[in-house]
Amino acid sequence: MAFSAKSPLQRLKTILSGLTGVQAAYEGVPESLPYAVSAYVTLGGQDPKDIAGGLRSRWANYRVTFAYRVGGAELTAEEALADILDLFEAALYADRTLAGTVESLEADWSGADEPRYVPVVGVEYREFPVMVKVKQQRNYP
């Protein structure tokens, strides 16, 4: 398998686009969030290294962020995010290879241990980040 930072990024966006309740999914951080419920995926750190003679491995991080426009409805925001997170976990682990783009993956949900309410152009959003860690390997001469 060749290394590709873009392929997992695209596949994660595809998964986000298919989640019930997510109105818009983006690659990269959008300049504005025009929908009540959005999700975006961004590139994170990449850690390539030789692991054996002729074999190279790369762990790569992708940050998935769910954003819910609160509008004074904090309870609704939390419950909607809870439903979306359950759907995301099921979709993510249904195929741990992201349609053959990676060897394996894991997700770290702990980035939301402290709730984040973020103003975006004067509107408050509840954000929930998930770090998706993927592994790719390739042979080299």
Image: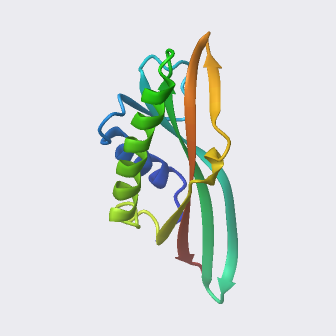
Residue at (41, 55) in percent of width and height? 89
Question: Which residue sits furthest bottom?
Answer: 53
Of 136 and 83, nearer the camera is 83
What x and y, as percent, mark residue 73?
47, 20
Residue at (34, 61) in percent of width and height? 99
What x and y, as percent, mark residue 120?
61, 17
In the rendered image, which quarter is residue 58 located in?
Answer: bottom right
Picture colour scheme: rainbow
Report the side of 138 relative to 17 (left or right): right
In the image, residue 62 sits, relative to residue 115, either above or below, namely: below
Q: In which quadrant is the C terminus drawn?
A: bottom right
Question: Which residue sits furthest front?
Answer: 75
Residue 29 showing in the rendered view: no
In the image, residue 112 sits, relative to residue 46, either above or below, namely: above
Report the side of 58 relative to 67 (left or right): right
In the image, residue 114 sits, relative to residue 45, either above or below, namely: above
Residue at (45, 53) in percent of width and height? 7
What x and y, as percent, mark residue 65?
54, 39
Residue 57 showing in the rendered view: yes
What x and y, as percent, mark residue 68?
48, 27
Of 79 and 9, nearer the camera is 79
In the image, residue 16 sits, relative to residue 8, either above or below, namely: above
In the rendered image, which quarter is residue 35 located in?
Answer: top left
Q: How many marks?
A: 0
Residue at (49, 48) in percent of width and height? 9
